[in-house]
Amino acid sequence: MMGNSYYEGDYIDADGQFTFAWNDPSIGIKWPTQNPILSDRDMEAYLKKEGK
């Protein structure tokens, strides 16, 4: 039986985290869309990459 796993401990320090833009060419993923639905965090990474 498959289940979901997720972290239930203390909050991990956000200052030590980073986010790639969804379409960062260095990752090399060819996504089948140009208009994804992004979380606020992912949108922020996208806007930084685009220089906005």
Image (cartoon, rainbow, N blue to C red):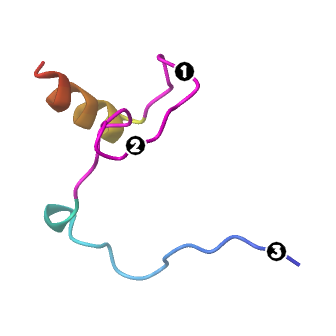
Secondary structure of the residue carrying numbered label 2: loop
The tag earlier along the polypeptide, 3 or 1, is: 3
Looking at the image, which residue is at 28% across and 73% down?
12
Magenta part of the chain = 18-38
Residue 4 at what x, y percent from top left?
Answer: 69, 70
Looking at the image, which residue is at 47% across and 17% down?
34
Q: Residues within 10 Å of mark 3 (few under 14, many from 20)?
A: few
Image-quadrant location for residue 18: bottom left
The tag earlier along the polypeptide, 3 or 2, is: 3
Q: How many numbered marks appear? A: 3
Q: Nearer the viewer, residue 9 or 50?
A: 50
Q: Quadrant of the N terminus?
A: bottom right
Q: Mark 3 to mark 2: distance in Å?
A: 29 Å
Secondary structure of the residue carrying numbered label 1: loop
Amino acid type, mark 3: Met
Residue matched to label 1? 33
Residue matched to label 3? 2
Amino acid type, mark 2: Gly
Q: Mark 3 to mark 1: distance in Å?
A: 29 Å
Residue 28's disc is: 2
Report if residue 11 lies within the magenta region.
no
Secondary structure of the residue carrying numbered label 3: loop
- Horizontal placement of 12 versus 52: left or right? right
Q: In the current view of this chain or complex, which residue is farthest to the bottom?
A: 9
Amino acid type, mark 1: Thr
Looking at the image, which residue is at 12% across and 18% down?
52
Q: Residues within 10 Å of mark 1 (few under 14, many from 20)?
A: few
Q: Residues within 10 Å of mark 2 (few under 14, many from 20)?
A: few
Looking at the image, which residue is at 76% across and 73% down?
3
Residue 11's disc is: none
Q: Nearer the viewer, residue 11 or 38?
A: 38
Report if residue 36 lies within the magenta region.
yes
